[in-house]
């Protein structure tokens, strides 16, 4: 099983009141964590997350307007729409963790950016993980 860790930005948790609705940016070099997308214009697929015992269906979308629409600039992958209440207790710089579940549902967690012990404990619980991708974890140590 693989896990993906991503430091949250304010616009990803709805803190900027932007149009993204808190969608999580997925760096291009980590999109293969998910099943392959197919299609030409803004391809997408459904992704189920288990977060605090609730199953939430999201979409992984490759916003690729830049490649087919005149004057467009989008060229990014996002997990969206992220329900605002999902991150109601999260802060910018907290760590969003996704792990492949054996049942095809991704396990999701948010760990406080100030809690190194909580982050280490989560990683220890996932000691059987074959691959751990650490993204944008400035100033977070992984022991």
Image: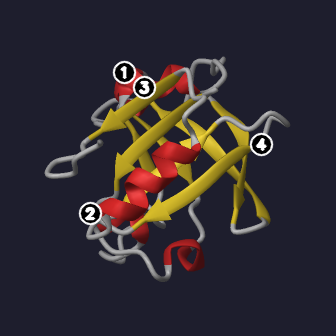
Disc marking residue 45: none
The kind of secondary structure element at disc 4 is loop
> What is the number of the mark on residue 30?
3
**Horizontal and vertical percent position of residue 4:** 47, 37
Circles 3 and 1, Cβ within 8 Å, touching? The answer is: yes
Q: Is residue 44 above or below residue 9?
A: above
Is residue 83 visible from the viewing direction of this image?
yes
Question: Quick check: 91 left or right of 59?
Answer: left
Q: Is residue 1 above or below residue 48?
A: above
Q: Are marks 4 and 1 in contact (CB under 8 Å)?
A: no
Marks 4/3: CA distance? Answer: 18 Å
Residue beneath disc 4 = 105
Q: Which residue is mark 1?
A: 29
Q: Is residue 46 left or right of residue 66?
A: right
Dot 1 alpha-carbon crowd within 10 angstroms: few under 14, some 14 to 19, many 20 or more: few
Q: Disc 2 designates what residue?
A: 93
- The residues tagged by marks 2 and 1 sit, at their Cα atoms, a distance apart of 20 Å
Q: Residue at x 53, y 35 (%)?
A: 3
First in sequence, mark 4 or 1: give its number: 1
Can you give x and y, in whole percent of width and height, for residue 121 in the image?
46, 55
Residue under the point 55% across and 20% down: 130
- Is disc 2 in contact with disc 1, using a CB cutoff of under 8 Å? no
Of mark 3 and mark 2, the one earlier in the sequence is 3
Q: Position of residue 135 (x, y in %)?
A: 31, 38
Residue name at image x 55 percent, y 25 percent = 33
How much space separates mark 4 and mark 1, taking CA atoms?
Answer: 22 Å
Q: Secondary structure at mark 2?
A: loop
């Amino acid at each position: 099983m693989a896990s993906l860790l991503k430091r949250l930005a304010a616009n990803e948790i709805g803190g900027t009141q932007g149009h993204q609705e808190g969608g999580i940016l997925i760096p291009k070099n980590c999109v293969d964590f998910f099943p392959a997308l197919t299609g030409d214009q803004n391809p997408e697929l459904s992704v189920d997350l288990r977060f605090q015992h609730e199953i939430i269906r999201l979409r992984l979308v490759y916003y690729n307007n830049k490649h087919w629409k005149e004057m467009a600039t989008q060229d990014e992958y996002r997990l969206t729409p992220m329900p605002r209440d999902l991150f109601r207790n999260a802060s910018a710089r907290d760590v969003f963790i996704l792990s492949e579940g054996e049942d095809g549902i991704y396990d999701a967690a948010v760990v406080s950016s100030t809690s190194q012990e909580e982050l280490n404990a989560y990683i220890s619980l996932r000691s059987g993980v074959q691959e751990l991708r650490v993204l944008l974890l400035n100033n977070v140590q992984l022991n």
